[in-house]
Image (tube, rainbow, N blue to C red):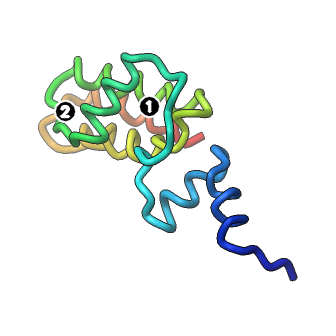
Amino acid sequence: MDIFDGQALADMLADPDAAWIAEQYLEIPADAWPVSSLDEEYTAARDRWLVNDAAPQNYADFLSIKRGLRTATYEDEAKPDISRWLKAMGCFLHDGVPDRLKQKVRYEVAVGVT
C-alpha cells in the first residue's frame, strides 16, 4: 500500500493528464488551471461559452464551439475544458434545431469523446 500526503496528491492532480480527475471528482473548475500557450481566439471563445455560460443561438455559435471543442480534443493544455465544451455543444440537441445541424453536433461530440 502506498500512502500519499496532501502535497503529493496535489502534484499528481496538477499534471495536465490527470486534471480531469480533479475537475470531475473534486469539483475544481477547469478555469482554475493555467492556460498559457493557447491562442487568443480560443481563450475568448472559452470565456464566452464556458466561463460566461452564454447560450448558443445559431450556426456561427456552433462553429465557435466546434473550434473550442476541437482545440480541447487535440491540445494538451486545453484538455481540462473538454467536458464543458461537450456540454456546450450538447445545447444544440433539442427540438427546433435543424436535423442537419444536429447531425454535425453528434459528429463533433463523437470526435470529442474519443
Who's the residue at 25% across and 42% down the image? 91
Task: Give the vertical position of 57 relative to 21 (above or below).
Answer: above
> Which amino acid lies under the numbered mark 2 shown in the image of this protein?
Pro
How far is disc 2 from disc 1 in space, using C-alphas? 14 Å
Who's the residue at 22% across and 42% down the image? 53
Between 84 and 63, the one nearer to me in the picture: 84
In percent of width and height, residue 22 lies at 54, 60
In percent of width and height, residue 25 lies at 51, 67
The image quadrant of residue 4 is bottom right
Residue projecting furthest to the right: 1
Task: Give the vertical position of 2 relative to 19 (above or below).
Answer: below
Pointer 1 local density, CA inside 10 Å: few below 14, some 14–19, many at least 20: many
For residue 105, the mark is none
Relative to 17, 73 lies left or right = left
Numbered disc 1: secondary structure: helix
Residue placed under numbered mark 1 in the picture: 69
In percent of width and height, residue 23 lies at 49, 57
**Contact? badges 2 and 1 (CB < 8 Å):** no
Who's the residue at 34% across and 32% down the image? 46
The image quadrant of residue 44 is top left
Residue placed under numbered mark 2 in the picture: 56
> Which amino acid lies under the numbered mark 1 shown in the image of this protein?
Leu
Between 99 and 43, the one nearer to me in the picture: 43
Task: Give the vertical position of 96 relative to 104 (above or below).
Answer: below
